[in-house]
Image (spheres, grey):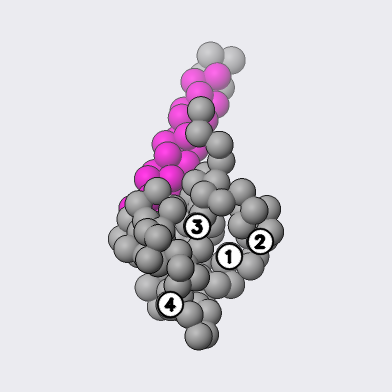
Amino acid sequence: MNSRRAALALFAAASLLAAATARAESAAQVFARSCSPCHGKDGHPSPVFEQQGVKNFTDPAWQKGISDAQIEKTIHEGKKGTMMASFDKQLSPQEIKALVAYLRKLGSPKK
């Protein structure tokens, strides 16, 4: 009986890991499709876009100066007077949360 419980626990852990990996992949795909045209494939916009105010997600000062809730709100609503459009109709709440986590990873130091 204990080996069966252990096997079930191992299966559950593997399933959670697979789901987390799938979310990370889908967030990367969402970023590539919806964000990278302006913010760059690695989160660093081209100099032309950066001069126009497009945020650099790899910038530690930007990462430190904004909350997850603020990022979510910007993705939901866009920012009037800027190039940032609302993605409320294109992305689900789960995709937006996954995207915020992905943006945080772009700001992590590379090893």
Q: Position of residue 35 (x, y in %)?
A: 38, 62
The local secondary structure at tag 1 comes to helix
**Residue denoted by label 2:** 66
**Residue denoted by label 1:** 71
- Is residue 94 visible in this depiction of the protein? no
Q: Residues within 10 Å of mark 2 (few under 14, many from 20)?
A: few
Q: Earlier in the sequence, mark 3 or mark 1?
A: 3
Residues marked 2 and 1 touching at CB (< 8 Å): yes
The local secondary structure at tag 4 comes to loop
Q: Amino acid at mark 1?
A: Ile
Q: Earlier in the sequence, mark 4 or mark 1?
A: 1
The local secondary structure at tag 3 comes to loop
Could you tell me which residue is drawn at 65 percent across and 65 percent down?
69
Magenta stretch in the rendered image: 6-30
Q: Amino acid at mark 2?
A: Ile
Mark 2 to mark 3: distance in Å?
Answer: 12 Å
In the picture shown, does residue 91 fall above or below 15?
Answer: below
**Residue denoted by label 4:** 83
Could you tell me which residue is drawn at 37 percent across and 73 percent down?
90
Mark 3 to mark 4: distance in Å?
Answer: 14 Å
Q: Earlier in the sequence, mark 2 or mark 1?
A: 2
Q: Amino acid at mark 3?
A: Asn
Q: Residues within 10 Å of mark 1 (few under 14, many from 20)?
A: some
